[in-house]
Image (spheres, coloured by chain):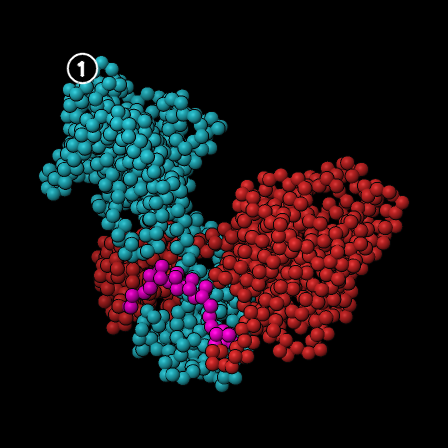
Chain colours: A cyan, B red
Amino acid sequence: MHAQWVLNPPEPPSMLHQIVDNVKDTLLPHPNPNAFSSLRNQPFSKRAFAFFQDLFPILASFQDYNTHKLKCDFMAGLTLAIFAIPQCMGNATLAQLSPEYGLYTSIVPPFIYALLASSREIVIGPGSVDSLLISSMIQTLKVPIHDSIAYTQLVFTVTFFAGIFQVAFGFFRLGFLVEYLSQATIVGFLAAAAVGIGLQQLKGLFGIVNFTNKTALFSVLKAVWTSFKNKSEWHPYNFIIGISFLCFILFTRFLGKRNKKLIWLSHVAPLLSVIVSSVIAYKLNVGEHHVKDYRVEVLGPIKGGGFNPSSLYLLTFDARVVGHLIRIAFIISIISLTGSIAVGRSFASLRGHSINPNREVVSLGIMNIVGSFTSCYVASGSLSRTAVNYNAGSETMVSNIVMALTVLMSLKFLTGLLYFTPKAILAAIILSAVPGLIDLNKACEIWKVDKMDFLACAGAFLGVLFASAEIGLAIGIAISFLKIIITSIQPAIALVGRLPGTDAFGDAQQYPMAVNIPGVLIVSLKSAWFCFANANLVQERIERWMTSEKVKDGKGGENTFTHVILDASSLTNIDTAGIASLMELNKNLTSRGIKLAIANPRWNVIHKLRLANFVSKIGGRVFLSVGEAVDACLGSKVVPV
Amino acid sequence: MHAQWVLNPPEPPSMLHQIVDNVKDTLLPHPNPNAFSSLRNQPFSKRAFAFFQDLFPILASFQDYNTHKLKCDFMAGLTLAIFAIPQCMGNATLAQLSPEYGLYTSIVPPFIYALLASSREIVIGPGSVDSLLISSMIQTLKVPIHDSIAYTQLVFTVTFFAGIFQVAFGFFRLGFLVEYLSQATIVGFLAAAAVGIGLQQLKGLFGIVNFTNKTALFSVLKAVWTSFKNKSEWHPYNFIIGISFLCFILFTRFLGKRNKKLIWLSHVAPLLSVIVSSVIAYKLNVGEHHVKDYRVEVLGPIKGGGFNPSSLYLLTFDARVVGHLIRIAFIISIISLTGSIAVGRSFASLRGHSINPNREVVSLGIMNIVGSFTSCYVASGSLSRTAVNYNAGSETMVSNIVMALTVLMSLKFLTGLLYFTPKAILAAIILSAVPGLIDLNKACEIWKVDKMDFLACAGAFLGVLFASAEIGLAIGIAISFLKIIITSIQPAIALVGRLPGTDAFGDAQQYPMAVNIPGVLIVSLKSAWFCFANANLVQERIERWMTSEKVKDGKGGENTFTHVILDASSLTNIDTAGIASLMELNKNLTSRGIKLAIANPRWNVIHKLRLANFVSKIGGRVFLSVGEAVDACLGSKVVPV
């Protein structure tokens, strides 16, 4: 009777139908009980407020905002600005842009994000990985970049397209796309990017003038070696200043970790380094009459003057490059989302609330589009700055706004003071962020849990290091998916035995106490698919097992089987090649007087077996469970031919 | 106690280890009880015979060979030659080679294959699909092919490399590689190749002189259209002769199918057509004094003179093309193996014995290497000729040898008679094979059983038709594997209920009679992996289900759950992202006073969960089966917070 349940299931949804269902479920919004639309019967004022709150989640924070929270946010915002200003200038030089663009990018994007986002912790600004990617990928374009203005045009255009992509991802609820970068790939990618970032800083640290723009290991080492040979090209002062302040910054961070009370020291250390090193550089350089004769390479004149200038007229849609720019923007938009969402998720869970990924993605996109109009390049959520914000006790996104205003003020009044800031000090500040990108602990854990994951991690790392960011990512993604394919189609089978004292059956290797049923060979598939890629191999293996030592009963004698039971419970699907192999297996077994039975087939499997008329071929021997199949086999035991 | 079995399994082999095991099991030979090496203690004569028999399986056929079998093989071989000669000449013209090369390819390769192969049915010769691939792919090379000698050089070199690839595949036991072309891909590919072959024949059928060499639909139709506009280019006699004999050949085949006694008619029809049409062409063309003025396009002078000339000096390893040739050879070697192995398998199973794929692959490879030295191009097992051989009553591979000798004789004595054979008749003979390549029934069946498979089939078909053979194959393979990935990582979960009157639990959609356990939500995963690509989505879905209508008990009231049981039996593996999601799920459930339990985790899954310390986080609630988990949950029922 139970077998009838197995044999006559309702028709399962087709694969296409299932895919559509899954896509729908992933993409369509799920009703939010607090959303505007659920307030139809409320008074107008409440509905209006809910509507604006839906649009600008920051309004929700204001409902119970008080002077204490304001004080916390204000202090956090100031700390953030002090920490972020040198870092943003450094990242801008990493992106081969003039330092003021880093500051611009810390004004408009955080402000817009603060208004739109659902997160309460993320701090927005130019990231080091994004900066590196922008400079290394735009330089591979086969268009001559004569001057920095043409280059800046390309950067803003990439920012614009990246924003468009992000809005599209969020709008079509494709926030889940970032999931396809497995953690292993990200760990490897970031570590290699960190190495690339570190290598690029050798330029600033040594004050090398003719340096490669490539990030690949060999090019950089070669450039360093060349400049070492022509010693005239660099001045040791650059190196001494850079290294000393790098040590200082790292030391204050170490102190802050040891003693939580000293953490403010690590927050102000970068700005302090900038000020002190600028004074030193001024002293060393004074007396020389031309910038080129300076003993310490300095930033020189920086455009200041206040609020971000418009960059709308800089966007370029030149047909020769726009295709490349869109490709670059796609990669950068994904990478920058991955980082931002991961930062948002981890800090939200620290505070015990959750973020809405699609909402975040749209906010990041709008922020980048507006940014590209106002002289900002790609901005994203920064891990180090978000951590500073959290430690400084911020309560809401107001801290982002305070930071933006502080950066704006400093841009208006203080850029003149940056003339004598050594380039080496920016290199030191970027270098101090490199260790945070290399997560050796995680890599060790990945190695311990899954060697194939580690391969993806190592592949991404080596790919980025020796080829390019795109190739590294492609390797990581390919290995991650290859792993899934391999286990889904591995032609492996397991011997199944009865677990003593229960009705349950299990893999004899997993449960060594399992006992064989005399005369019945029970095998289960380790793969999820029985298809063109493994069907013949599995069939051959089952036939070989019939005579192999492994499955004999250990009593020295031949174990003559009368039945083979295929435990199909792990099989998620089967295709026409799989069915053909089962038919052949059945034919071969029948010719040796052995009967084939199928136990616990899943919905799609039994449906396809019935469609292909296989069930009648094996005399309807399909059972609800291995136990029922064994009972039926032993009950009808026949003398083998 | 049983939970302890689950919690303390032996350590499973690592994924790398499993892969190595699977590869070993696939690649290493399994002892053959009749093999030479197992005869160590036998007398020398027996061992020597076994050794030679191992090398040349045809010797085994001679053990019980008699005059009856010889007569059968002889008649089959003669029939084969009569059937094959026109077909081989046609295929050679399809490959843009002079017709005699098709005959050469029917002499040496079948002879060598007959000595080496384990099959007893396959008939070897130039195939139409291989011929089409060779001509279409070599013509895409960016080397100028001034004369037919340079082209012939490239063809022989491709044949040589294809042979090398095949020997390598067989030697490293990679015969299973052909499995990765799913049946759906092959059906679509062959159908499109058949259309391409058919279109190419329009040239011969219309006697068009300036014709495109491309196979893509648009190019051919354009060329036909152009030649229709310039009517002077073709003579209607070509078309009339071609179409009439095509109808004749198809009619005899129809007769043969209706009445088995008339099947010999379909075997001799092609040769008969060649003879009769040559006489007609002679009559029509006589009186003209120059070939160019002939009213019917004829083959003209064919080099005859007997045995295959050496082509060793023709092999070219020019650095500019050798890379391309190797790529082409790789694709052709796979395609030609796929066809040969499929033909061998299906006819072997008709006769009730089996073939050894790796042995076959090596034999095909050696045959092609030797062929490339003796003016033969790529040969493979031909479906139509193997069917003729089978119908003509052949007993052993001797029929292949008889065919080779007959073709050799005709090449020595009869080529002069082929001068007036119309090109249109060869086109008709090739066209008559086209319907056999288009398997509409199979395509319908694929559509019925699996829509995604049909997508792979249609993709391969359209890719070959509108782009190229390589792109079509790539599309088919990509869709086939995409299907596996999609089902392995689909973020779908199923509600599980108890099947009434049993201890078993099942998918509530598959078994509509399943009943829910009040207070316990049991979900199973439909995917085989719980990993970076679906972990977050599955986690969110489970949390959403807690409040969704679907899983309420239908009595109108809220169903307050105290436990969630995750039935992990379908899960073949989990990765770090999956474990992280489970951790978060457990945290979120715990905060709502709900306990999480895992039922029936498989070997790799429980091992990784233990490594990541997840088992202790859920209080050791891991059970052997859903039933035990439910018992444990209900026994320790707690008041929800």
Tell me residue B341's x, y (percent): 58, 62
Vertical comparison of A57 with A521: above or below = above
Vertical comparison of B172 with B303: above or below = below
**In this view of the protein, can residue A90 be seen by the observer?**
no
Q: Which quadrant of the view contains residue B58?
A: bottom right
Q: Which of the chains bears the disc numbered 1?
A: A
Towards the viewer: B605 or A233 = A233
Identified at 79% across, 56% down, the residue is B274
The magenta span reads B9-38
- Give left or right: position of B354 versus A467: right
Disc 1 target residue: A287
Towards the viewer: A88 or B396 = B396
Identified at 55% across, 41% down, the residue is B320
Tell me residue A167's x, y (percent): 39, 36
Q: Secondary structure at mark 1?
A: loop
Tell me residue A254's x, y (percent): 14, 40
> Does the magenta segment cover residue A87?
no
